[in-house]
Every structure is written in structure tokens, then in C-alpha cells.
Amino acid sequence: MIKNITKSVVYIGVDDTDIDLFESQYVVPNGVSYNSYIIFDEKIAVMDTVDRRKCDEWLQNLEAALDGRTPDYLVVQHLEPDHAGSIAKVLEKYPNMQVVASDKAVKMMPQFFFDVELEGRTMGVKEGGTLSLGGRTLHFAMAPMVHWPEVMVTYDSLEKILFSADGFGKFGALAHDEEWAGEARRYYFNICGKYGAPVQALLKKAAALDIAIICPLHGPVLTENLGYYIGLYDKWSRYEAEDEGVVVAYASIHGNTAEVANKFADILRAKGAKNVVVHDLSRADMALAVEDAFHYSRLVVAAASYDSDVFPPMHDFLHHLAIKGYCKRRIGMIENGSWAPSAGRAMRNIIDRFKDVCVVEDVVTIMSRLKPSDIPALEHLADEILAVKCERCS
């Protein structure tokens, strides 16, 4: 796709609707876009490349947009292969083009491009570094761990454009017109969620800039109501719940724990709970379950015991939350077992790794199947999980 962002900045990215799993783990039913841009001035700068899956299509876009001109610079903001996968081919096509990247990226490049002659073709930049294209100057700000250590972002001070690397990106090809926040949230918490503090540091740098357009490496170019997008990123990177609600995530072997979880969700709704979301972890998109856990203010996990531990889908879910920095939430637990329930202990071992959470201490224990005598304990757990939040999980 070739599209003018402004008279001097052109989008040359590509949609990938053939991909089934982004990063070999995230379901992308509407595909994903790999974004790349050209800035035309006295000098011409290409902003990032694309995944090698779409290299040929991207090179066609690049050549068509250049219309016989030759690019002077390739600005590499992020070395991850979905953005840097076509560097070798574009350097071969344009042998005089110079690569501009963070010092860290320049040092890392031989790890990916050991068969490419980079000597004399790279320009490392530091925080506050600049590159003049003639009529405009590009300003570089380092964004380490958003979400790799070599990341930088670029600000075009003439047209007030922030090239934001993976920041403000989303799943979904551009050909699919869909609401931004849902797939941007799923992208953020699964890709960048661990790195809230570095995202906060980058937002502080961005706050000092006059930004009219945000050009991310995935998803649509953002041109209106930028405060909305920046506000969500601020909230997400502070690990604050976006909405009040309860996620009930369960891992059930034979359906008995599923019955308990769904009954508990009904109890929550009867008590007036807002936004009760239920996930069957054996079948749900794990990335969506993780997204919802961060989206809402409360979480209840229900799982069957398994091999003196917990049923693996629950272990997987809690592990995902732990490595993404899950915090500031109220959490309750339901365990099921037939002779020696172990799920509660196993879940608590992982939950204890979470920071600043409020755990309801009374674990509801179900012996094999839900019985009328279990309802009072579920009612009590619902009351506890819906209680006023304390300072740690607010």
C-alpha cells in the first residue's frame, strides 16, 4: 500500500493477512500490518523495513514511491525481524544508502546480518541525536525496553510527526477497519506489558513534543484525538485497571470446574457486578485472557487439581500474567479436587510473585462437583472480591 501521510511523508508498508500466529504465539484473525515510511526532502530517508515474509511486496512499494530517486538513509528504529527482516535486501538494492540506528542497534546488527557488509554503512546515534535531511531535522530519542533494548523513536520537528516504533501499535491489517483500542490493548499487554516503567519514561519524553501525527510500526497512522491514545498508553503502562469488572478464568478437565466458574459468574452478576468476563483457559485465546485480566480491576481463578499441582492451562495463564508484570488487582481463588486438592496452593505460589495485589485469603474448595452446600462459600467469595479496593490494588 502506498499512501500519502503528508505531501512529504509516504506510507509504503504492507498487510500480512496470511499469517496465523504473530511471533508464533498470538492469534491474529485480521492479520497484521508491517509499517514503513519514506520522508522526502533534500535527502530521502526510509523509516524501517518489513518482515521478510513481505519483502518483495515492500520493495515494490518502495521503488514505486521513489519513482526513480535513490534513498540516502535507512532509519532503523527497532531490530526485531518483523521490522528489520528486509534490511539485507534493501541494502543490496541501494548500496549507497546509510543505516541510521541507535548505538545499541548498530552493535546488535551483526547478530542478524553477519553476511552483510556493514562496515562504513552505519551511523549510530544517541539520545538527543539529530539528522538533517535538508529542510527538516529528525530528532532521535532512545526508548530502551519498549520493548527491546535497542529501540529508539524519531521526531520530525517540521511536520510534528512521531515515528513511534512499536509504541501505539496494534494487531490487525490496515485493510480491516476495526475499533482501535481492543487489538491495541491485546497487543500492548502481550508485547510490551512487562515494560510499564520504560513506556512511562518514553511518554514523558513525548510530552515535551508538539505531536500532530503518530506513525507506529503496526496498525493505523494516528492523526486525530491523540490525547485518547496517549491517555490509554499512560493508564496501561501504570498498570491501572481501565474499567471496573471481574474476569473469571477457569481451567476445567471434565467440566465440573467450568460449572463452578459459570455459577460464580452468575452470582457476581446477581450482586450487581459490572463487566463479568469468563474465560475457558483450555480453549480461549490466551492473549485475550491476558488482555482482559489487565483491562479489568478484579480476577478470580478457578482450577482443577492435577498431579498434585494445578491443571496446566491455569499454570500457563498465571505464568503469562507473572512475566507481564501483573499487579494492582484484587484476586480470588477457587480450587477443585477429588481427594487431595492442590490447585489453590499451586495457584498461590505463582500469585505470590505478583506485586501490589490483594488476595482474598479464603480459597473456595470444591470436592469433585458443585453442591448446594458450596453456594454460601461462593457467595462469600463474591462479596469479598467486590469489596472496596484497598490502596495496594487501587
Image (cartoon, rainbow, N blue to C red):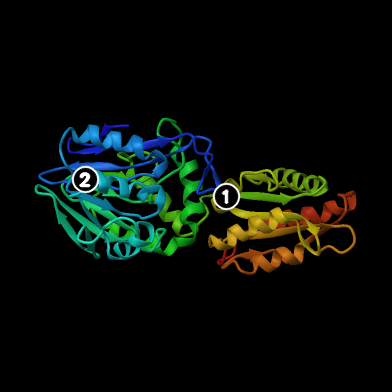
Residue 9 position, x and y percent, is 21, 39
Distance, label 2 to label 1, CA atoms, is: 53 Å
Q: Residue at x 29, y 34 (%)?
A: 60
Secondary structure type for disc 1: strand
Residue 63 position, x and y percent, is 24, 35
Quadrant housing the N terminus: top left
Q: Amino acid at mark 1?
A: Glu
Mark on residue 244? Answer: 1
Q: How many marks?
A: 2
Secondary structure type for disc 2: loop
Q: Is residue 309 left or right of residue 322?
A: right
Residue 183 position, x and y percent, is 48, 42
Q: Residue at x 48, y 53 (%)?
A: 191
Q: Is residue 1 above or below residue 256?
A: above
Structural crowding at the residue carrying mark 2, measured as other residues with C-alpha within 10 Å and reported as few (<14), some (14–19) or many (≥20): few
Front residue (pair 274, 367)? 367
Mark on residue 94? Answer: 2
Structural crowding at the residue carrying mark 1, measured as other residues with C-alpha within 10 Å and reported as few (<14), some (14–19) or many (≥20): some
